[in-house]
Image: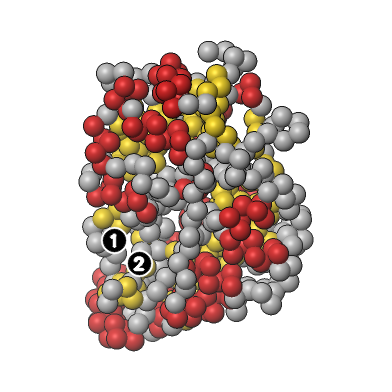
């Protein structure tokens, strides 16, 4: 169908018919992850997947999960591939039906453009058009910008509760092959309330953050606790893969001004909005926020040019030399390589930057500071910067192995230090080094 012949449908039967006319067997489908999932389209696709696969199979790229749309049983005609197995998508990995792409986040656009990661069909949740007729991608840009440039088919779901946001991409009606009206409210990502451990970790990080710093934060209890500890700072900036409700509150309090970033002055940059109604209201038509594609948010050159980039990321476990596993816990794939390495390297190159990995020292009684990782090396020790637990900060930058081990032992849980030290002596002996 030519792009200027956009199909507009308003009922379920027409949506199914429209999808059937546009999809081909073997197509690879992409859509916004988490809050940006176009639920009417994705649930229609899953419900009618056998019809839409046309006797073959479909492929679906999986990001961060925010809904119960995808289940292992859907692998009857769908091949799942993706970079993450967090949240509800963990069930796909546990069932062995999710083919993990262990790629740096910054590499995804290039892999899409070259066809290594196929993107035939893009399903979008978009805002209603502005007075100029431009549909905003609303809650997400990320890798969808690259997917849009490669896709044969673009299908939009107009959601009146999605904010109109500034960004590098907006669409006209003629850019869609089909437009439908949403029947679902946008998904909320609710951040769990930080406990004493998360607050202690946040306190250790907050003392490192200076006025004028540029923030990159992940999602979860620790990042939200860190943001809550920064209300006495001035002129903080945002350049992050994700923005949360905590970011909106900092901006509303006058703390997040984006005036000292060194680029995009006065404007916070994010790839996706991961929050709820508060975040959406703040983001709507806000000129102080812009969503950008992964090739910008995770660009090494862009990150290096920012002033005082404080990158705060999480991990499953960290070994005594600084190797980081952010993917596998208990033999189950539950995380991602994601953008952690991109941001840690960017912060290391940024003037005054801080590459931080934060995690509790113990989880379910087991130490997360370990002598040997139980999963893959998501971040090599050459990229380790500052490791933070509730017991302190281990600055590993430029440190030899023996000094690293001592600093990591100091931030491990006291009840595990003796056993870790015993294992460390043996490990260092094989490396030809000694404990300091």
The answer to whether 367 appears left or right of 31 in the picture is left
The answer to whether residue 157 is above or below residue 229 is: above
Q: Which mark is residue 317?
A: 2
Q: Nearer the viewer, mark 1 or mark 2?
A: 1
The mark total stands at 2
Q: Residue at x 36, y 60 (%)?
A: 325
User: Which badge, 1 or 2, comes first in the chain's sequence?
Assistant: 2
Q: Residue at x 74, y 62 (%)?
A: 257
Q: Residue at x 76, y 31 (%)?
A: 132
The answer to whether 7 appears left or right of 80 in the picture is right
Q: Residue at x 27, y 29 (%)?
A: 77
Of residues 19 and 169, the one drawn nearer to the viewer in this rendering: 19
Percent across and percent down for residue 181 are 54, 32
The answer to whether residue 360 is above or below residue 116 is: below
Percent across and percent down for residue 256 are 70, 64
| Residue 106 in sight | no
Task: For mark 2, give the secondary structure.
Answer: strand
Looking at the rendering, in which quadrant would you find the C terminus?
A: bottom left
| Residue where numbered disc 1 is placed | 329
């Amino acid at each position: 169908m030519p792009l200027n012949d956009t199909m507009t449908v308003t009922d379920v039967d027409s949506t199914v018919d429209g999808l059937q006319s546009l999809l081909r067997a073997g197509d690879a489908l992409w859509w916004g992850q988490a809050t940006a999932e176009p639920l009417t389209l994705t649930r229609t696709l899953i419900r009618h997947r056998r019809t839409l696969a046309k006797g073959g199979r479909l492929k679906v790229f999986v990001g961060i999960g925010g809904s119960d749309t995808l289940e292992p049983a859907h692998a009857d005609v769908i091949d799942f591939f993706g970079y993450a197995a967090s949240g509800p998508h963990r069930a796909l990995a546990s069932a062995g039906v999710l083919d993990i792409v262990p790629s740096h986040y910054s590499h995804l656009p290039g892999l899409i453009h070259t066809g290594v990661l196929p993107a035939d069909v893009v399903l979008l949740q978009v805002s209603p058009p502005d007075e100029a007729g431009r549909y905003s991608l609303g809650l997400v840009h990320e890798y969808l910008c690259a997917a849009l440039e490669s896709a044969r088919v673009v299908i939009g779901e107009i959601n009146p509760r999605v904010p109109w946001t500034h960004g590098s991409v907006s669409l006209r009606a003629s850019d869609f092959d089909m437009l439908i009206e949403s029947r679902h409210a946008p998904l909320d990502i609710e951040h769990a309330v930080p406990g004493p451990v998360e607050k202690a970790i946040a306190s250790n990080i907050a003392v490192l953050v200076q006025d004028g710093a540029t923030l990159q934060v992940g999602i979860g209890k620790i990042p939200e606790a860190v943001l809550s500890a920064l209300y006495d700072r001035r002129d903080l900036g945002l350049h992050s893969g994700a923005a949360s409700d905590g970011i909106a509150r900092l901006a509303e309090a006058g703390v997040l001004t984006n005036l000292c970033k060194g680029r995009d002055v006065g404007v916070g940059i994010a790839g996706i909005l991961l929050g709820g109604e508060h975040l959406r209201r703040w983001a709507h038509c806000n000129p102080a926020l812009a969503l950008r594609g992964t090739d910008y948010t995770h660009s090494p050159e862009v990150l290096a040019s920012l002033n005082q980039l404080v990158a705060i990321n999480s991990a499953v476990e960290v070994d005594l030399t600084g190797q980081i596993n952010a993917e596998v816990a208990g033999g189950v794939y539950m995380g991602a390589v994601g953008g952690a390495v991109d941001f840690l390297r960017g912060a290391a190159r940024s003037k005054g930057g801080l590459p931080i990995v934060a995690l509790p020292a113990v989880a379910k009684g087991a130490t997360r500071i370990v002598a040997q990782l139980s999963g893959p090396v998501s971040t090599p020790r050459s990229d380790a910067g500052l490791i933070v637990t509730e017991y302190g900060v281990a600055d590993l930058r430029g440190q030899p192995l023996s000094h690293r081990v001592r600093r990591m032992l100091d931030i491990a849980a006291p009840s595990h230090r003796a056993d870790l030290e015993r294992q460390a002596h043996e490990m260092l002996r094989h490396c030809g080094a000694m404990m300091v």
